[in-house]
Image: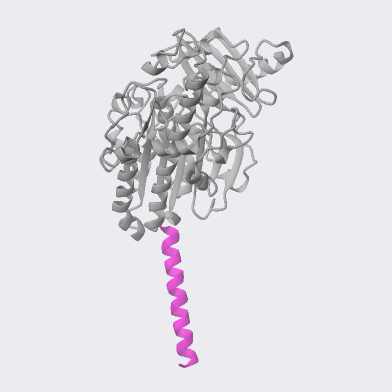
Amino acid sequence: MSIRKTAFIVLKYLLLIYFKQCSTSTQKMNVLLITVDDLRPQLGAYEGQDFPASLQVKMHTPYIDALAAKSLLLKRAYVQVALCSPSRTCLLTGRRPHTTNVFHIGPYFREVGGNFTTIPQYFKINGYSTIGIGKVFHGGSSSAGNDPISWTEPHLDGVSHFENSGRSWSAVPDEQLKVKPLVDQQIADKTIKTLRKFAPKALSGKKPFFVAIGLNKPHLPFVFPKSFMKHYPDVELPENPYAPVNMPSIANYRCSRLYKDVNATRKDEHKNKALSDSYVVNLRRAYYSCVSYIDSLVGRILSELDTLGLSNRTIVSLWGDHGFQLGEHGMWCKHSNFELATHTPMMIHIPGLTDKGVSSRQVTESVDMFPTLVEAAGLPSLQPCPVNSREVALCSEGTNLMPLIKNPHGPLKTAAFSQYQRKGYMGYNMRTDRYRYTEWAKFNDAPEYRPNWSNLAGVELYDHDIDPQENVNRAFNKDYTSIRQELSRLLRSSYERGL
């Protein structure tokens, strides 16, 4: 073969590689958003100072941990409300509760807040196939049936089996599940089927996809395949099964779900009394088993991405809609502003950018997900919202977290903000690097939606440097007077200017 012919073949080969790379580089990234209900960040990836509850048990979450190892892992991410519907509304709209006006389960943001563009809706506008599977939005009236405008495909749900027995937990024999699979297994199956359906067009570059799935467990009741109990032969009791010292009564909450097995053990229905040690151990083991069960389903879904050849062109984000208290402070719920209720797992794998893993301890929030996914996918960036954005369809009240990939230690915000409404008061909460500060202000509901800072039902201040479990409220400790004054000023001014 002549030198000229050889050179021509080599040049042709190089040009083919070049044009293939150019085509790939302009191809839009797919997105898989995984939401998990009541998942506190008690995972292998969060072991150590970033999860302050007492732990003697090692969690079995190999698949989520593997995802975290190749993601931008937000070690200190916080939700805006520790309750399903308002928390998911904040994530999916990129707006805070004072804009959505959704503080509890029931109201629909498009009716009480504004006609805001959601994450899947924005990807839909930009040419994506979008589908929701399972609990993404809170269903029913809270989202007018899963916010139909957000999707190009009909929303898919699972069918409930074994999960309404009236008991707080149940370990279902694995053999039974071959005939009647649990809801989350059905959701995983439908997700895999959907990925197979979308794969050909996504791989060819004709139609990228945005798939959002919502796994129900470990939400109460804790129902799971019995085989997962083997991972937790020994389960610890919480070190602090009591209310914090000097905690205002309005901050206290006992889960209102009246499971017959739990109620049989309670001597006082009106206070967060600790359950018997044996029952606490059983409940905690059941919760942990649910987490490992969910982890296995995440593993199945991510494995399918690999099988389909989609892993290197699909952004994968996993997020918990809030944490959960497993007997700490005597509580078995979220419904509060404590660390264990507001702290959530959040991670984003972006092929080619986070493959080696990037871990950040900077304070971040759920509202940051929208602008971050948009930037990661290469879509037109979102503009910051004005102070009053109820008439603005598309903007963001969150922060783009992409700069943390290059500089995970660079601070992007001074605090994370959460809130919880109870008994005519709103607990406005701020988590800084060191402190958690809350003021329970009288709240004027619709149509004003405004706090009365001069009428407080309680104030809380927890110093995480010396009290990571939040066992002592130091709001009225003289040594913290100046700190409280500064935190109060920052909290109020932040809310008044729209954060």
Please provide percent x and percent y for residue 275: 49, 16
Residues 457 and 329: in front is 329
Rendered-image quadrant of the C terminus = top right
463 with respect to 238 (left or right)? right
Whether residue 29 is in magenta: the answer is no
Q: Give the residues drawn in magenta, as a range.
A: 1-27
Say how the picture is coloured. one colour
| Residue for point 40% across, 43% down | 297
Whether residue 8 is in magenta: the answer is yes
Residues 292 and 255: in front is 292
Please provide percent x and percent y for residue 370: 45, 38
Q: Is residue 498 visible?
A: no
Q: Is residue 214 visible?
A: yes
239 w.r.t. 314: above or below: above
Please provide percent x and percent y for residue 254: 46, 14
439 w.r.t. 372: above or below: above
| Residue for point 36% across, 16% down | 260
